Amino acid sequence: MHLPVIQRTGYLLRPWHSEDAPSLVRHANNHRVARNLRDGFPYPYTLGDAENWLENVVENREDLILAIEVDGEAAGGIGVYHLKDVYRYNGEIGYWLSEDHWGRGIMTDAVGAVVAFEFTRTRLLRLFATIFENNPASMRVLEKNGFSLEAIHKRSVMKEGVLMDEHLYALLRERWVAQKKGDRQG
């Protein structure tokens, strides 16, 4: 997949580069960020973690994995992992942003931009995300972009010794297209 560069107001979505390691550590090494993500995103987040992750992601051309650049440095990430086999028309969206930039609408806008890219440039018919019960801000990001709650997986996630629910949100391409038509008519 050709990775796009998407210029937005106040930030840029772009491919990751190996030179992003120091800024990745600076913004990712935050417990308030890591507590809302899977364990593959460690805390503390070290330079070695950043270098290993960047080595893998720079080589990945099957999925959309982008840095969120704010004020000239990578301060977050957003991606869509394209599923395989019978799920090949599904993509799982995931994202995080430095606490320094929370509350500015960046993530809501970035999710919208990535949804538009995926639904206009790929064969995906469904995007979904799973959100821990203790992260209502991320649920609102998805809802503002037209995602609907499909399921609550009860007591399915163990994070930091706490067993909690996982909320599954999804958006179908056909619903997204209908929403866009409604936005243009309204």
Image (cartoon, rainbow, N blue to C red):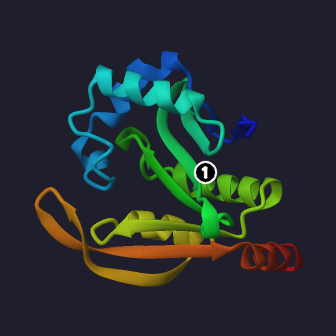
Q: Describe residue 178's horizontal placement relative to residue 75 as left or right.
A: right
Q: How many other residues sit within 10 Å of disc 1, few (<14), some (14-19) or many (≥20)?
A: many
Quarter where residue 134 is shown:
bottom left
In the image, residue 177 sits, relative to residue 11, either above or below, namely below
How many numbered discs sit on the rendered protein?
1
State the SS at label 1.
helix
Residue located farthest toward the front when viewing the structure as drawn:
85
Judge by depth and name the residue closer to the eye, 84 or 151.
84
Disc 1 designates what residue? 110
Q: Which residue is pictured at 72% across the width and 56% down the height?
A: 118
Q: Which residue is pictured at 15% across the width and 56% down the height?
A: 160
Q: Describe residue 95's horizontal placement relative to residue 63 as left or right.
A: left
Q: Which residue is pictured at 52% across the width and 33% down the height?
A: 57
Name the amino acid, label 1. Answer: Ala
Quarter where residue 68 is shown:
top right
Residue located farthest toward the right when viewing the structure as drawn:
185
In the image, residue 57 sits, relative to residue 159, either above or below, namely above
Question: In the rendering, at what x and y percent does residue 150 appear?
Answer: 50, 83
Judge by depth and name the residue closer to the eye, 90 or 102.
90
Question: In the rendering, at what x and y percent does residue 1 appear?
Answer: 73, 40
Question: In the rendering, at what x and y percent does residue 153 appear?
Answer: 34, 80
